[in-house]
Amino acid sequence: MSERDDQSIDHELAGVAMAATYEHERTVSGGETEAALVAVRSRVAAGDLGGAPPSVPLTSVAASRRSPWVRFGAVAAVMAMFALGLVAIVGGGARDDLSAPPTESAAADQGVLPAPTAEQATESEPVEGTTAATTSTTTTAPTTVDAALEVIGVDALDPPRLVEPLPYFTLPREANPDGDGTIEFAVGSDHVVVNQPGTGSITIVGPDATGISARDVPVAEEIRSVVSGPGPVIYGIGDPVLDADNPTVPRAFRFVAIPFLGENEGEVVAFEEVGVNDYLEIPPYFFGHGPDGIVARGRGGETVIGYVDEFGEPTGSGESAENGTPFPVFDFKTGTDLPSPPERNTITVRGADVGWRIDITRDPAWEATFVGRNVVAPGTERAIYFERIGADTTPDVDFGVNSMPVVALLNYDGTGEWVRLPDDWDVVASDVWGTLLARITDDSIELASLDDLVPPAGPAAPRSTSTADVGSGTTVAPPTTAATQTTVADATTTTSIVDDAGSDLVQPTAIGRTCGGEPVTCTQLAATESGRIVGFDAADDMLRVYDRTGTELQAEVPIVDSFGDDETFLVAVGPDDVAYFQTFPPTAVDDQADLVAIPLVGATAGSSVMRWTGLSANGDQTLVPRKTGLTSVGCCGPRVTRPDPDDLIYRWVDRNGEVIESVAPSFDLNLGDAGNSLTRIDTASDGSPVFTRFTLPTALQYPRDFPRVVPTDDGGALAHDVVQTTTGGVDVLVDFNTTWPANGVSGGDVYYLGAGADFGVPVLEAAGTVLVGDDDGFVRRDLDEIASRSWPGDHRLLDDGETIVADGLNEFIDSTSPTWAADADLFGYQFVQSVGPNEEVQVSFVDGASPVIAVETTGLLDDSVAATQHRIVVERGADGRFRFVSGTYGFRCAEGRGHQDFSTEPCV
Amino acid sequence: MTEDEFDELFRTAYPRLVAMGLAMSTSRHVSQELAQETLLRAHHRRDELAGYDSPMAWCRRVMGNLLIDHHRSRVAEDAAVERLGHRSSTQVDPTPDPSTVAASVRWEDLTRSLTPQQRVVATLYYAEDQSVADVAEILDIAVGTVKSALSKARSNLRRRLGGPDGLVEEAHS
């Protein structure tokens, strides 16, 4: 064989390579490309930057002066400087002005939306005689709508369901010696801005290596009506611009841009002038993001300042991650005056066939507020509208505080629902990254997220709505109607088992639990891809199919070829309702098993339609469902991507044994430097994948092989695994959700199994519930009923940057007696709740008179810092549970970059 | 770059990037994910890309780097698995996943033995028909590095291609 020259080699290689590329390219259909484009746009809308999420570097909290928070008078602090010249303007905010319905009020928002259509009509005339069913029993004058919109009604006398805020962070509140002023908030891509007039600074709250922290950024110019981002820039109304001829009277206000990072931190790097009377007496989150700059949501979406970077250079519309979404405008129209019950309002998305009708019936003792009507704002994958509709709690004061805060959750499929917050909580900011709640007391500002509380209402979610066809024009798709539940008597003659997706989940179930055989096995459960429950009893070789609720037996399917005494496990139910069993026949080699596919429906129901032999089954593998089939993930290996894409696939088959694929979501696990994330892979209608990544909680950083994980109805996932700690194996359940901040997990999303699940957790359900064994049956439980929730709060650092405080931790332990509080590892995880890419968290425990739990995080993506440490001094209570006593935070520098002990001295 | 212009870029680039991933022996779904990731980043920089002569070159660079990262982690992981002998346990006869099966003599089979960087360089040079200078610019590495990687790749591939009949021999080896 002669040596070939480079040219000949190149020629041959190029031919093969180009042919291969061409062949590959042809396999990418136009539909797949379009679906991928939609997926990318959704990620853009969700604020996904790609790669590692940005974080806000936070330093110690500097001392600052804080002002008291009042519900109205947002301009008071700035106006105080020019009181003489502006008294008349401030006084212009008369109640009569507020009671008049705005003729045109709009909000410029962004979010995940259906494809826009042709330019939508702006205003339309009232339709005489329009009637519509709402939750209110009161009827009023016809409303102004131009489409068949979902009516989403709320009535103060028939309040919607209550949701409890999930805490995010708590700030101290200090007295403001300068007088009153509204504490304002803004939601950024991964942080929250708190703005307190009179302090001369803004506070950035966001994640860093220590968890959630806050830092104050002194600002050269005090601002109000703040908006954050894109990028590390805050916008808001700043100082007045004085008239040269009359320096006591401003002729305009500056709408300024102030970076909170970099060399210009706290400085005004750009501004535009806005009319002095344009933006007085405005409600919270009146301003928001537009396509090219900050817009007035409550005033037709007009742009007040273009986006700039931290140097004040215009960024246009493409420089940052957040401003690339199609920014629709919400038109808010009302057909009735405040507070005519029910007040009928129409919200439409300009340029898209989407809208809602929100009918509001306030308490008869309701009072108009000083700043008037709130604005519609985007939230995470939905829009929101917030009001207080209860009685005035301070009737002796003008513009008092109404009770009953309620939020309309407006999904972009045209559906929605109202929910109620506890009376002392308000929606204080909302943007595509999330909806922020706050409760302000005399000495603290508590922040919470709405998004963790209420999953987007899908077709099966409860809503206090009805559909009103009130005119012609655009058409909104009606909500999905739940299929009728059908009882199947004879599965062998049935071609399918009808889903009952709309059924309410109830407990207990009708699923019996029996044990028998040798070795003894008990009823095993699995769920079909549509959520129905399948039970397998080895004792009588019977498969039983129940509806989604488990309350109705739909079919009994005898297994034709009995497994006999072979140890057999129900592994999964794949597409086309085919069940898969792992069985150990006597002929099998040690540590090997067979995999058998048995349909639940059709002419072959109960018969084996496919059998694979020789599966490695020494107990160190888990069969994981994929799009194409089941794959075996082994234990304890170094593989950071699981399942390995090159692993063998045991293909799904249909009831006739023909190979098919699943459209159910599947999951990838990427550990260590691959990302420390769980990825949910959905399948678009054209077959292309759509990826959603979730941060891993610290408890799941070292999974043995692959956690059991199911997709949940809210787009997230519910996972179960057993983790090893110093006290042994602990069952952990994680409620992954797609909400702000950025698909992460907070302490409240991680649960550790305790009493109430003596027989394990055989079924994880799409609703976020589980089925557990209960003597001779199975019952449905919420996670809180069977497991100890992690601490939903988080620690913080004091001004010295070193001292750790854990507000509410001991109280949480006292009140809930969580099992994790008796385990040093799990206690330590409360202080480092999730792991970032490449990070590893190790917990060490030194017992003694003053026990110490040290939580060390290494693998930080920082070339100067090698590790961080949270050193927690604890005491053990009489109940065996630890309590927090004190804590310190420090970091160790990388070799050659500074100190090698844990301290807060900067590294070099 | 307007949204419409970005959409146009996306529709052109996405199939090519997926094909680029597949040509590097990456599974289809990883290729799809990395292509989406690349174009997500492109969206964030679309105004910057509008000023480039070839936005596609920028996309190739990002895709190439993502592929290198992906393959490096895979190579290290596979080596460790091999050392532990875990691969030998899969003595079964499952129905293979068609997306991972080589139908005939294919480019990815040839390049599987290359290092991640060599594989990207070879893919860009041979499959994408880029010049050495263009590959250097796309990957943001020196021309000399490209030449070196290409030389080593060619040397490796020469052995795998074998005699005058080239691929036939390798296909049966």
Image (cartoon, rainbow, N blue to C red):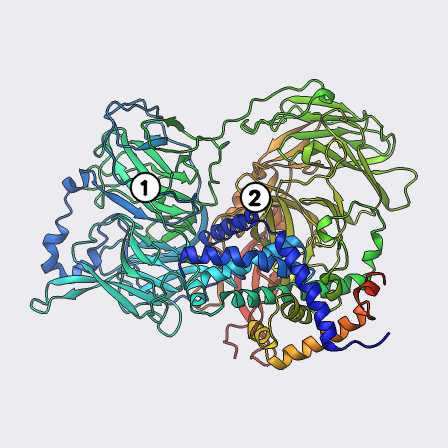
Depicted A394 relative to depicted A878: above or below: above
Chain letter, disc 1 residue: A
Residue A703 visible within the image = yes
The mark total stands at 2
Q: Nearer the viewer, residue B163 or B173?
A: B163
Percent position of residue A342, x then y = 27, 29
Local packing at callout 2 (Cα closer than 10 Å; few below 14, some 14-19, many 20+) is some
For mark 2, give the secondary structure: loop
Left or right, A841 with reference to B108 = left
Depicted A432 relative to depicted B130: above or below: above
Residue under label 2: A684
Give the quadrant of the N terminus of chain A: bottom right
Depicted A258 relative to depicted A751: above or below: below
Left or right, A684 with reference to A236 = right
Label 2 and label 1 in one chain: yes
Q: Nearer the viewer, mark 2 or mark 1?
A: 1
Local packing at callout 1 (Cα closer than 10 Å; few below 14, some 14-19, many 20+) is some
Residue under label 1: A120
Residue A116: image quadrant is top left
For mark 1, give the secondary structure: loop
Left or right, B109 with reference to A109 = right
Residue A568: image quadrant is top right
